[in-house]
Amino acid sequence: MKMKDVILMQQIHGNNVVMVGKKDIGTTIPNCDAMITSDPGVTLGVRVADCLPIFVVDEKGRGIGLIHAGWRGLENEIIVKTIQKMENQWKMETGKLKIIIGPHICPEHYEVKEDVASKFSSYVKGVTLNSGRTFLDLSEVARQQLVSLGVKNEDITIDSKCTFDDPILPSFRRDKTTQRNLITLSI
Ligand SMILES: [Zn+2]
């Protein structure tokens, strides 16, 4: 996969979802943290180091979505917005979507401040307290948001690999790195 064949996003921890197509190949979409497309042959790319890369695939092949989400994206409902946009564009049902969440930082390594944790206190097991420190489980929050949208739990696959633990994967928390892991999804 060459970079000139991929559509990338600026990734500003916002919640803007953009519909892209063949005309965007080789570009980076500004003010964008999620993309959807139905153009055959298009490859979407997300660059991550600790955040969630979330793949949304329609069983019937009508379209795909790719989401970049950290806690800000989850708080601002980027997953909901992406799936709603796919539903509106292609009349797909959330019960027919397959979701894959790629490698991300695990809850044991994702300490957050209390004001961040308090935004997710309504999610069962979303926040864990340990010795006066607070930890957030990004993929568990994402899973609960997906299920509440109507995605079946068995259609959600979560990669348990932790970016902080795995020296091969870039981790911002571990190294304060500018390196990112590029993950792509094609239709
Ligand atoms: Zn970890």
Image (spheres, rainbow, N blue to C red):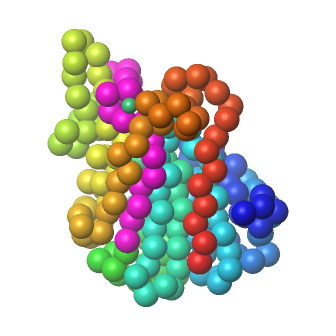
Furthest residue to the left?
Answer: 124
Residue 77 seen anywhere in this rendered image of the structure: no
- In this view, the residue in front, 55 or 37, is 55
Can you say which quadrant of the picture contains the N terminus? bottom right
* Above or below, 115 relative to 107: above
* Above or below, 114 relative to 137: above
* Above or below, 152 relative to 53: below
Q: Quadrant of ligand 1?
A: top left
Picture coordinates of residue 122, whole percent (x, y): 21, 41
Q: How many marks?
A: 0
Can you say which quadrant of the picture contains the C terminus? bottom right
Furthest residue to the top?
Answer: 131
* Above or below, 166 relative to 3: above
Magenta stretch encompasses residue 101: yes
Report whether 150 appears left or right of 33: left
- In this view, the residue in front, 120 or 95, is 95
Residue at point 60% right, 72% down?
186
Range covered by the magenta-colored residues: 98-115
- In this view, the residue in front, 76 or 33, is 33
Residue 84 seen anywhere in this rendered image of the structure: yes
Report whether 86 appears left or right of 43: left
Residue at point 67% right, 35% down?
179
Magenta stretch encompasses residue 163: no
Residue at point 64% right, 27% down?
177
Residue at point 64% right, 65% down?
44
Picture coordinates of residue 98, whole percent (x, y): 37, 71
- In this view, the residue in front, 24 or 98, is 98
